[in-house]
Amino acid sequence: MQTEPRLCLTGVIAHHWGIRSFRPLQREAIDAVLSGRDSLVVLPTGGGKSLCYQAPAVFRQETTVVISPLISLMKDQVDGLRSSGIGAVQLDSSQTPEERIACGRELRQGRVRLLFLSPERLVQSETCELLKELEVRTFAIDEAHCISHWGHDFRPEYRQLRKLKEIFPAASVHAYTATATEQVRQDIIQQLGLVNPEILVGDFDRKNLTYRVVSRRGPLLRQVIDVVDRHRDEGGIIYCIRRSDVDELTQALIEHGVKALPYHAGLTSQQRSQTQEAFTDEKCDVVVATVAFGMGIDRSNVRYVLHTAMPKSLEHYQQETGRAGRDGLAAECVLLYSGADFFTWKAVIEQSAANQNADTSFLQNAIAHLREIDRYCRSALCRHQLLVHYFGQRYESDNCGACDMCMGDTISVPNALEVAQKILSCVARVKERYGIGHVSSILRGENLAAIREKGHDKLSVYGLLKESSQHDVREWIYQLISQGALFFEDIQSVSGHTYSILRLNQASWEVMRGTRSVRLIEPAKLKKGQPAKASSVSEKSWDGVDKELFEKLRALRRRLADERRVPPYIIFNDATLRELATVKPTSLVRMLSISGIGDTKLRDFGSHFLEVIVEHSR
Ligand code: ADP
Ligand code: ZN
């Protein structure tokens, strides 16, 4: 049954989505679907992957099956599609038999363009029969990296998708992911049995994100509040390593007047979904979470992601920061780092490897990932460039204007070699038998019993760095370790405790002789009360926007969403609101030129927004 008028592809996209130009590779990805050629599409989060399989289904007026890992993700997509006037349903384990029968009926009537399924449900014989009857010829696999155990998010149930090509040999299969490593890519192709696939890999640079790595110092809460206060009333996610930190920080933020909620695996599933819902509905601004929070968050206007400690790999970091700014507008990613994070994680990983009897390659792999991100945190190079290089791509610009390094938040220590020589000499003087605490106390000339008892206050290195803070001296020691000019060795004490002492190597002596250079960094001193610099992307994304009008439109969106019991982004995303608050269209026809406003949404919401714009402009 064909009920929709025939439009050309771009007409269909403008009509339903209000999208009038393609993002990079969307056109190519859509062509692959239309020509029935298998494809693997790797685009960063927010790159617009869903349009690649949704648009062809609507254009061809036939049912495409979408495999998705989470019921909540499916639900968000189904709601979004329906609000744009597109037939969409999901079949999942939470439904009653009656609901499933109703879905089947709707499917047979030929009005459904997108059918969302979990991998388990797809391979059930009942479902296969139905799909054969419907003559489905296109399958889209969302979050396709879940099939690979090399990825960071392996899901065993995705392995069942290997049968897809056997059951439906004539259908084309299209895999979508934001995880880019070559190994995972090859694994996806092989596991799914893709035939001569079109492989499309997008640009991994998230230009709208500003990255900052900030040294963790002083009370954590103060550093957190600094970031939260720059983003008052905006959506943010704060990641902690431990559940207890999540609870404490949430409480402290609430006392500070922030609408914050906790999320971690120790909460009941009801509490977790309440947090998730409040966040999506913009009733809560900040979620404080362990890494358990993430997949299934479809709030596109997350304006910042804050890590209170280093994550355990750059893949995790990319994934977690990727949740910021999915609407394409500027967002900030702050990582509060300490050189101790590496060792905290190393201990955690070693412990869990021992508990699970994991093979040594697992441990080596995990530690290698840890080293990569540790190097990233300590590096004095552009963050955008480092991330893009890590994911195997070239980076052209030499100043991104959107990271702590390029914006001058951090400065190189001018006499780094001299400082390094003082530190290394101190390690040599105490005969490589002490840890970081004792060594830094000697260098700072601290008046401690532990130092006097050993006569270390008589050493020539005593007090050589007395002008520097304890924090800086420790950080420099960690920086020397990461540059290979010093290393930790674990020692068992008589009481059975393990502790780490600082040891020298070949490179240390080269530095002491001055034949090897080092780079040490310290944070640029902000004057008291001086706010953090805004990046050029963040300034640009507010260019010409009437902020007062934007806030009014946001309030209207929240009210309409409440009345309809849908999340606000289902109505319009922030990019659309900002464009409305810039262009200030004064008629419904003019509104149609705004990105994100298609015919259905114009009909449903146009006059409400028009009224507020006209009223405001008066
Ligand atoms: P991904 O799945 O790749 O993370 P989505 O498909 O969720 O990204 O798209 C992110 C946002 O970008 C959505 O709000 C979507 O409507 C919007 N979008 C997608 N393609 C375009 C486009 N060509 N122009 C403008 N907005 C787009
Ligand atoms: Zn940069």
Image (cartoon, rainbow, N blue to C red):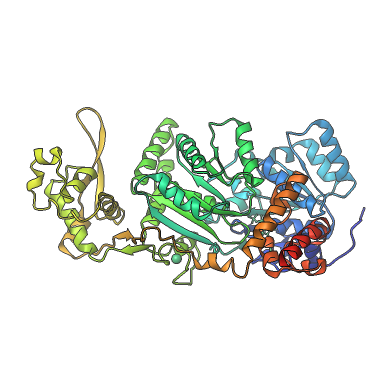
Residue 126 left/right relative to 68:
right
Residue that extends furthest to the top in the rendered view of this protein: 495
Let me know if residue 326 appears in the view. Answer: yes
Camera-side residue: 198 or 221? Answer: 221
Camera-side residue: 504 or 265? Answer: 265
Total count of labels: 0
Q: Residue at x 14, y 52 (%)?
A: 463
**Rendered location of residue 616, percent (x, y):** 71, 64
Camera-side residue: 386 or 176? Answer: 386
Q: In this view, does 329 lie above or below 368?
A: below
Residue 437 left/right relative to 237:
left
**Rendered location of residue 139, percent (x, y):** 74, 51
Residue that extends furthest to the front in the rendered view of this protein: 618
**Rendered location of residue 281, percent (x, y):** 67, 45
Residue 491 left/right relative to 12:
left
The answer to which quarter of the image holds residue 520 is bottom left
Camera-side residue: 381 or 415? Answer: 415
Picture quarter with ligand 1: bottom right
Let me know if residue 151 appears in the view. Answer: no
Q: Which residue is drawn at 18% across and 50% down?
A: 444
Residue 132 left/right relative to 347:
right
Q: Residue at x 82, y 55 (%)?
A: 604
Q: In which quarter of the image is the C terminus?
A: bottom right
**Rendered location of residue 179, percent (x, y):** 56, 53
Q: Is residue 257 above or below residue 392?
A: above
The answer to which quarter of the image holds residue 39 is bottom right
